[in-house]
Amino acid sequence: MRYIVLCLLLMGLQLQLVAQEHIVADLKIQGNKKLRSSFIKKISQVKSGVVLDSAIIDADIKRLKQLPSVSHAYYQVFLSHDNRYNVFYNIEENFTIIPSVNIYTTNDDEFAYRLGLQEFNLLGRNMMLGGFYQKDIYSSYALSFRAPNIFSKQLGIAINYKDLTTQEPVFFDGTTADYKYNNKSIEVLGLFEINFKNKLELGFSYFTEDYQYKEGATSPDVPLEVNVHKLLYKAIYEYNNLDYYYQYVSGFRSMFNLQYVTTTNETLPGFVIGWNDFYYFKRIGAKGNWANRLRMGLSSNNNSPFAPFSLDNNVNVRGVGNTIDRGTGSIVLNTEYRHTLYEKEWFILQGNAFIDSGTWRNPGGSFNDFIASENIRIYPGLGLRFMHKKVFNAIFRIDYGIGITKGATRGLVFGIGQYF
């Protein structure tokens, strides 16, 4: 009898504890105009009827601040009735139809630019549609569509088309030749969100590469014309634990990209290529931000003048020039200190001091190439950022890099958005 009474008392105590749990009565969205409330609720973990948990709410807010359409987000909790609470997500939206401009020069009077337009919140559902026109001696263009949550909270798709034409240097036997290079590609990717911090992309790209000799050195072993069809299989894994507070970023992010390329022409042989970008950001005081990017990559070590990794002004080392070298391995470190010089309502002026450094493995070379002095580039420099607080990625940047290693150049790099 005593045992039965004890069990009843314990059951009553358990029911009382459950009844005392704080429950979410409703999730309400405020402040959003274009971004749909239904979409915010779709990707949020907080739902009506779940236990009120501040850790889950914090994760939702962190996720929302990573969206291109959200400038800032915060939450409030109010008692509804009994032990039920209403949770309010307050959204400060970005303007998301964004033009892009990239201009880059060197002291060799090289000049190239890219003009684009992108919508980062199509239909209020975090979908991206955009394209660009590029002039780098020749004309190029591209179109892209990305919808990470179109099928469900976790499943989406991306489709990209590119027709890129540039003048590319080809390096062989200590000499250089210039080729007109064209790459036409169509890419389809499936997007899968494992959880809030971990995402996966899987897909393929069908493309053609065309090289046509223009001027410079020649060799019997290097063809004057090459046209080849290729199929590329791609896998991307991303870990993202970044936290945003307007222009400031803190946390760690990693992106691993693995590609396998098949070919119909042994002049441009198939290969495997993989690289990982590591990002680390830290707030320094009230107005400072330390930003870092480390890229480490390797590909099949084919002794080909058409190696996949390139040393380029607008991609990895500011001031170095437009595609001045190629390799089958790459290690690049970009580090910079960003400091808010002036901030008034929507406008921010930010200054930065940076060091870009990189080294390459020569096609067919060895790992010792990474420490060879002629392959190492170090470019310190200074820059300015003109930023709009309420427009996504509305950051006009100007950087000037000066090389301090062998064969160094110097040059300006203009663009939209932070360099990394």
Image (cartoon, helix red, strand yellow):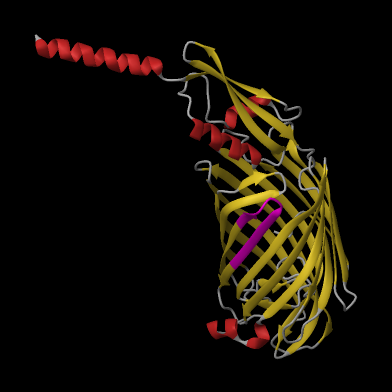
Q: Can residue 275 be seen in this view?
A: yes
Q: Nearest the camera: 94 or 163?
A: 94
Residue 86 percent across, percent down from the top left: 57, 18
Instruction: Tell me the residue at 76%/27% (across/down).
Output: 33
| Dominant secondary structure (helix, strand or loop) of the stretch shown in magenta | strand
Closest to the observer, 19 or 139: 19
Identity of the residue furthest to the left in this view: 1
* Region in magenta: 281-295
Rendered view: 103 above or below 62: below
- Going 57% across and 34% down the picture, which residue do you hit? 60
Is 291 contained in the magenta span? yes
* 105 displayed left or right of 266: right
The image shows residue 318 at horizontal and vertical percentages of: 76, 70
Image quadrant in which the C terminus is located: bottom right
The quarter of the picture where residue 281 lies is: bottom right
Q: In the rendering, at what x and y percent does residue 170 appear? A: 74, 80
Number of numbered discs present? 0
